[in-house]
Amino acid sequence: MNTPQHEILSAGPLLDASGSLTTAGWSRQPMLDCNLEKANFYGLKFLQPLRVKRWDYYAIFTPTHFFSFTISDIGYLGMIFAYVLDFATATFQEEAISVPFGSQVELPRNSQEGVSHFDNSKVSLRFSVENGARHLAVNWPQFGSTSLAANINLACPPEHESMTIVIPIEEKRFYYNRKINCMPASGWVRYGDSEHSLNPETCLGGLDWGRGVWAYSSFWLWASASGFLPDGRTIGLNMGYGFGDTSAASENAFILDGRVHKLGTLKFEYDSQHFIRPWRMKDEDGRLELVFTPFYERVAKTDLKLLNSEVHQMFGRYRGTMVTNEGQSLIIENLVGFAEEHHAKW
């Protein structure tokens, strides 16, 4: 059986005056103010900003395509990227821009409000939060040999629950992360000569919002999906481990119609030499058992000496069973999502 996890129920600061976490655990909504200015992990204080990591990663699931847009600042480098996957043809396109010291990258303090922005006159991304919705505006005229633009609204009312986790990493390092699944998407994406209209009855968005100070050498697994059950209810997955001390709480959960159903420890079984082979995920309490069958492998490698990263992000379909907090059994079939292994020195 899993050990009890700590659910954070009261608001407060993320870090105390000494730069230590005030608490560790998980919550259904972000409860802590992300006061990164209190971070205290280097004797040479002026070097600390170079080790703070911040990112907003949006994922858009449609019946035919996956679209992703990211604005990030890893301290000494801003990284802006987007990619598109056509499920039927397995056609994939990714473009990225690196900006020394995060120049022109704007990221808000907390996930509930503010604007994330990058504009270098060639590429513009703007993510804003207001009135129970998230708005994404993207203009990337030279996206490989074609162009990419988007105007997307993601519905996210205050009662929509998310998987938020706060965990320590080594001494005085930490990770504050919010994952939002299954936000109904409307608007459009133009990719080349095609325009994709987004219907909230068939299209959903997700957000990976991360802030923290990581160990230089890091590893993690992450699996996610946002889709629909046959009866029309939304179903989201968020599962992972490997990036810190999860004794207070894991990030494992599924999200049914906007409500988090928390899980404990999960076991991942996969072939790290052949990622395209089926993956299996199973929890210790018998509430989740899934098989993930990939149909496309995205490999992203970066080698900039100081920064070294390798990601194998597999897109595929989930099938299996899950059990809600109330004991209801759910059958999952052909739920499109992804699972990834990531090694980084950053």
Image (tube, rainbow, N blue to C red):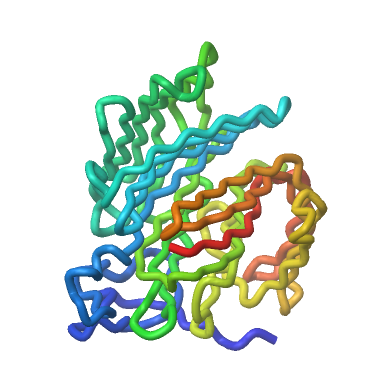
Query: In the rendering, at what x and y percent does residue 299 appear?
Result: 62, 45
State which quadrant residue 240 falls in: bottom right
Left or right? Give the position of 176 relative to 83. left
| 167 up-or-down from 33: above or below | below
For the point 23% across and 42% down, the residue is 104
| 324 up-or-down from 236: above or below | below
Query: In the rendering, at what x and y percent does residue 343 appear?
Result: 57, 62
Left or right? Give the position of 133 relative to 225. left
Q: Is residue 201 visible to the viewer in this orientation of the structure?
A: no
Quarter placement of the C terminus: bottom left
Residue reaching furthest to the front: 305
For the point 18% across and 83% down, the residue is 17
For the point 42% across and 21% down, the residue is 142
| 167 up-or-down from 53: above or below | below
State which quadrant residue 307 falls in: bottom left
Query: In the rendering, at what x and y percent does residue 21 appear?
Result: 32, 81
| 275 up-or-down from 148: above or below | below
For the point 62% across and 70% down, the residue is 325
